[in-house]
């Protein structure tokens, strides 16, 4: 099947919103900020946001955390496990968790609870996209790029079968049925 993409959020819109998010985060007056990027889908968003944080006068340290709740790669098990942990001490620091999508909330809630248990002074969360109707656990993001319709999105770091991560925009994959083709 042939796949087409429809742009949901273009590169310029995302860049403007990243600047706005950085200003909002800076206004929260974080202390000894540690930005923790939740991999994999958020890596492009995180890179742009961290540069915007620099422009807003912040200089966070940066770490990477890889979590998984998928058994076979397509269906969530409901249980989150650490694939790759951070190396930095979080006790007494403000932590900013950066993730791509807040959907069920399981991963973000797990990461937030983990950093709080490790003694973070404050755990803030920032997501590029929020799908409010999909929540399975009670968690809200402190900073949200866009409230996203319930569509399967790719691009700007997010993928389907490891494809489309390189796109500079967030898009929706549309599959053409054979009868739709000329």
Image (spheres, rainbow, N blue to C red):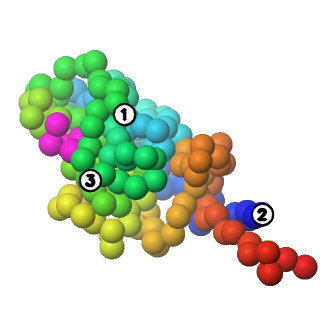
| Circle 2 residue | 2
| Of residues 76 and 105, the one drawn nearer to the viewer in this rendering | 76
Disc 3, SS:
strand
Cα separation between marks 1 and 2: 32 Å
Look at the image and give the residue range highlighted in magenta.
110-114
Mark count? 3
In the displayed orientation, state which residue is furthest to the right. 182
Relative to residue 50, is residue 165 depicted above or below? Answer: below
Report which quarter residue 29 is drawn in: top left
Which disc number belongs to residue 38? none
Position of the C terminus, as image quadrant, is bottom right
Residue at image coords 31%, 60%: 104
| Of residues 13 and 180, the one drawn nearer to the viewer in this rendering | 180
Residue 4 in picture, x, y percent from top left: 73, 65
Disc 2, SS:
loop
Q: Is residue 90 visible?
A: yes
Answer few, some or many: residues within 10 Å of disc 2's Cα (few below 14, many 20 plus, some between 14 and 19): few
Q: Is residue 9 magenta?
A: no
| Circle 3 residue | 78
| Magenta portion: prevailing SS class | helix
Discs 1/2, front: 2
Report which quarter residue 67 is drawn in: top left
| Circle 1 residue | 66
């Amino acid at each position: 099947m042939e796949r087409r993409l429809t742009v949901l959020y273009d590169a310029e819109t995302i860049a403007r919103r990243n600047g706005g998010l950085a200003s909002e985060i800076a206004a929260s007056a974080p202390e000894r900020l540690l930005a923790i990027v939740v991999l994999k889908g958020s890596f492009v968003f995180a890179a742009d946001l961290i540069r915007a944080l620099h422009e807003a006068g912040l200089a966070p340290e940066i770490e990477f955390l890889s979590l998984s709740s998928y058994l076979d790669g397509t269906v969530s098990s409901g249980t989150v496990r650490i694939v790759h942990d951070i190396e930095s001490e979080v006790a007494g620091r403000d932590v900013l968790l950066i993730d791509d999508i807040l959907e069920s909330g399981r991963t973000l809630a797990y990461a937030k609870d983990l950093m709080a248990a490790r003694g973070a002074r404050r755990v803030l969360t920032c997501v590029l996209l929020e799908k409010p109707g999909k929540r399975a656990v009670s968690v809200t993001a402190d900073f949200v790029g866009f409230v996203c319709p319930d569509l399967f999105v790719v691009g700007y770091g997010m993928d389907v079968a490891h494809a489309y991560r390189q796109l500079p925009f967030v898009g929706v994959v549309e599959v053409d049925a054979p009868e739709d083709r000329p």
